[in-house]
Each structure stands twice: as C-alpha cells, then as structure tokens.
Image (cartoon, helix red, strand yellow):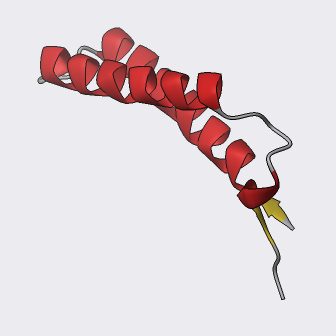
Amino acid sequence: MINIFLVIMIFYELTALTKIATLITGFSNNYLYFGTTTAIQIILGLFFSVFRYDYKRFYIQLK
C-alpha cells in the first residue's frame, strides 16, 4: 500500500534540496529556477495544510 501523501512529501523535500544545490553551484538560470521551485513549494505547502496524513483516499493498493 502506498500513501500518496508521503510521495508528495518526498517530492517537496527534493525540490528543497535542488534549490539549495542550485544556489551553491551557481546554476545559470538561478533566479528563474529559484522562483519556480518556490512557487511549487508554496502550492505543496497549501496542500499539506489542507490534507492530513491519515486521509483514506491517499492510500493506493498495489497488486
């Protein structure tokens, strides 16, 4: 059984790590990428503030 909430949480953490990595390495489109990942993190933050971890519809049964 997979919990979609945790998958989205992992995606959120990956966006935070890539944002830090681009700041450290000096990526060429740093401002555009920083703004894009910030917008994604705001949307995901709103998602986490609305839904709870134990919401039944977020569980997917695997065969």
Residue 33 appears in which quarter of the rendering?
top left
How many numbered discs?
0
Residue sitting at x 19%, y 18%: 30
Q: Nearer the viewer, residue 1 or 15?
A: 1
Q: Quadrant of the C terminus?
A: bottom right
Q: Is residue 2 above or below residue 12?
A: below
Q: Does 5 sit left or right of 17 as displayed?
A: right
Q: Does 35 sit left or right of 11 as displayed?
A: left
Measured as percent of width and height from the top left, residue 7 is found at: 66, 49
Q: Does 1 sit left or right of 49 as displayed?
A: right
Measured as percent of width and height from the top left, residue 1 is found at: 87, 68
Residue sitting at x 61%, y 28%: 50
Measured as percent of width and height from the top left, residue 43 is found at: 41, 28
Residue 8 appears in which quarter of the rendering?
top right
Residue sitting at x 62%, y 22%: 49
Question: Quick one: which residue is furthest to the bottom in this view?
Answer: 63
Q: Does 39 sit left or right of 10 as displayed?
A: left
Measured as percent of width and height from the top left, residue 34 is found at: 26, 17
Residue 60 appears in which quarter of the rendering?
bottom right
Q: Is residue 10 above or below residue 61?
A: above
Q: Nearer the viewer, residue 12 or 28?
A: 12
Residue sitting at x 82%, y 55%: 56
